[in-house]
Amino acid sequence: MALLRNVPKPRMKLTFIPSETVEGKLVVKYKVTDILPGINRWKAVAYGYVMGILPTIGAIEGFAQANWAKFGFEDVHKLSSGLFTFRFKSEVERDQMLNKGPWIFVRKRLIIKAWSPDAKIEHKGEEKVPIWVKITNLSLQFWNEEMLSKIGSYIGVPLIANSATSTMERMSYARVYVEVRADHELPDFVPLVNNFGDEFRQKVVYDWIPPKYSHCKLFRHDDKWCEYGGASLVDKQGEIVVDDPKVRRE
């Protein structure tokens, strides 16, 4: 075993390839054939991160094995700033996993996307994020697809209701998944007005609200500093989570 540990790992053998001058500028020029090996290697990859927390690669790998083994999950790699790549056996199986989402890691949203050669594997924050919304003590006449859609649309773009809401197995509250925008404030109630002008304030509660930066109006970056200038990271109540006047755009 000791001899095996001392076996050197294979290394790429690199060669000198001169750069080229294009319109008076020295550049590295490449052809499609130069990047085909990389495209073929990573074509069945998804990449993403968990909103609001920085999980260890062990925790992420355990999550992926438990939930995505049936989708042909093979391995995970950690990149910078809390980003991960997830490789699958095929693009079809990867897309099946994506279509089964949304995926939740420790009550936080896992932002995950399919990789493509044009993808920029980075995250500077999200303009829109889906979150779970509880509609508490909802009156019986409002328990239908039309009214749940209208209530969800006041908050953002409604996507789905959970199974207990859809089957009305639990009537203490309705639970809907809504895509919300970082530049919109989340309401604590939804005003419902009937044909006679009577208004009822329907209370809503959020399972989790991602903090957002006050300057760039994006939901939380993985990095704790906003790159768009000295800006504070604030939560829904306006409390400062991160504030550093030294932060400046590079």
Image (cartoon, helix red, strand yellow):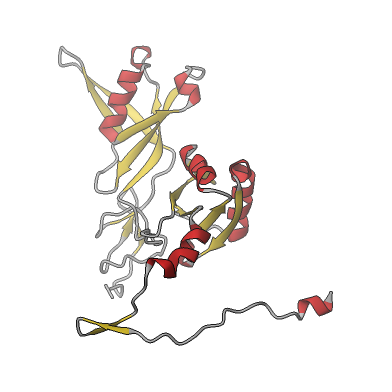
Near-viewer residue (228 or 171): 228
Task: State whether residue 51 appears in this view.
Answer: no
Quadrant containing the N terminus is bottom right
Near-viewer residue (123 or 30): 30
| Residue reaching furthest to the right | 1
Q: Residue at x 31, y 25 (%)?
A: 149
Where is residue 191 shown, x and y percent of the image? 24, 26
Where residue 70 sits, quadrant-wise, is: top right
Q: Is residue 160 above or below residue 42?
A: above
Q: Residue at x 55, y 48 (%)?
A: 90
Question: 184 left or right of 141?
Answer: left
Quadrant containing the C terminus is bottom left
Question: 39 left or right of 151?
Answer: right
Q: Is residue 149 above or below residue 5?
A: above
Question: 136 left or right of 70?
Answer: left
The number of numbered badges drawn on the structure is 0
Question: 196 left or right of 44?
Answer: left
Near-viewer residue (66 or 217): 66
Task: State whether residue 113 appears in this view.
Answer: yes
Where is residue 193 shown, x and y percent of the image? 20, 19
Where is residue 48 shown, x and y percent of the image? 46, 54
Where is residue 13 shown, x and y percent of the image? 56, 82
